[in-house]
């Protein structure tokens, strides 16, 4: 009888060890590739929203939506149903945050985290409806662009009034990764203390969220889209009066110790 051929136990262990070593080398690379794909998808979605805003403004004397009531909230209810419908319009979602905090029955978690989408909002509001399937998403509008009445000094100092003719538009955020659909960032407000439950009434904390390894997706007033560094957010020109050299920038004197531990390792601006 001929000899039986096969692997010895030692040979099998060596092969398994080699496979484990290769996997340990490849997994970080694969994770990086997946994150790059999510970032590219996020940027593409935001670029689409930049086009929506630009086309709307061009047809509306340079103005965007007004928002509903004196507060200016709920501007998204003023969109046509085709844009509201999150089941059809997938550009509402950053690829890292596709699950709404509430389900279609209005049941869900009590607090957001950075990988949730806001909504689903279904109830009509002041004569406006939420579309056939309600509204939800994971991006927010820089609400200093809402076409609010410029009948006060505060409004004239802060609101842009028009999307067109914005100076240095490539540094003015329009749409961004966010935990709510509206945000009015101020130069003096800090980031959230908790990286994963980053929901507060401070509007900068609504978009200073670590969805893309120290960055968020953003489309600017000139319709250009790119990822923005988390600490860079304080150097962007959110409103007409926003201080881009405020206390949370290097120019304004921020130090490493001023940042919460979760955001401290990311690039300074």
Image (cartoon, grey):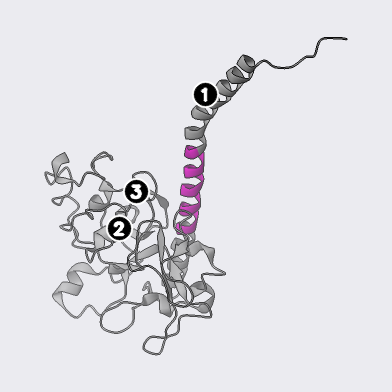
Q: CA distance from mark 1 to mark 3?
A: 35 Å
Of marks 1 and 2, which one's residue comes earlier in the chain? 1
Of the two numbered discs 1 and 2 in the rendering, the one whose residue sits closer to the viewer: 1
At 29% from the left edge and 51% from the top edge, which residue is drawn? 195
**In screen coordinates, is 116 left or right of 254?**
right
Q: Which residues are magenta?
A: 31-46
Of marks 1 and 3, which one's residue comes earlier in the chain? 1
Q: Is residue 134 magenta?
A: no
Q: Main secondary structure of the magenta part?
A: helix
Neighbourhood count class around disc 1 (C-alpha, 10 Å): few under 14, some 14–19, many 20 upward:
few
**In screen coordinates, is 246 left or right of 10?**
left
Residue 255 visible in the snapshot: no
The part of the image, by quadrant, that contains residue 122 is: bottom left
Check disc 2 and report the residue beneath it.
197
Residue 45 to residue 76: above or below: above
At 37% from the left edge and 67% from the top edge, which residue is drawn? 109
Query: Which label is found at residue 21?
Result: 1
Element carrying mark 1: helix
């Amino acid at each position: 009888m001929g000899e039986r051929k096969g692997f010895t136990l030692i040979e099998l262990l060596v092969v398994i060890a080699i496979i484990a070593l290769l996997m340990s080398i490849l997994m970080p690379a694969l994770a990086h590739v997946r994150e790059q794909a999510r970032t590219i998808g996020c940027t593409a979605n935001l670029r689409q929203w930049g086009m929506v805003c630009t086309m709307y403004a061009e047809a509306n004397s340079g103005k965007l939506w007004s928002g509903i009531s004196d507060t200016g909230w709920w501007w998204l209810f003023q969109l046509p149903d085709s844009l509201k419908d999150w089941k059809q319009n997938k550009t509402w979602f950053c690829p890292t945050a596709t699950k709404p905090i509430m389900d279609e029955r209005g049941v869900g978690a009590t607090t957001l985290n950075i990988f949730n989408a806001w909504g689903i909002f279904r109830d009509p509001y002041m004569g406006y409806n939420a579309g056939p399937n309600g509204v939800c998403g994971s991006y927010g509008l820089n609400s200093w662009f809402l076409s609010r009445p410029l009948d006060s000094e505060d409004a004239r100092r802060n609101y842009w009034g028009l999307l067109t003719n914005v100076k240095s538009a490539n540094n003015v955020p329009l749409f961004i990764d966010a935990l709510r659909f509206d945000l009015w960032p101020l130069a003096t407000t800090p980031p959230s203390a908790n990286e994963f439950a980053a929901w507060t009434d401070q509007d900068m904390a609504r978009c200073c969220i670590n969805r893309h390894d120290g960055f968020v997706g953003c489309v600017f007033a000139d319709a250009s889209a790119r990822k923005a560094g988390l600490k860079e957010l304080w150097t962007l020109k959110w409103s007409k009066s926003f201080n881009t050299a405020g206390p949370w920038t290097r120019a304004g004197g921020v130090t490493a110790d001023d940042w919460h531990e979760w955001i401290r390792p990311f690039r300074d601006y």
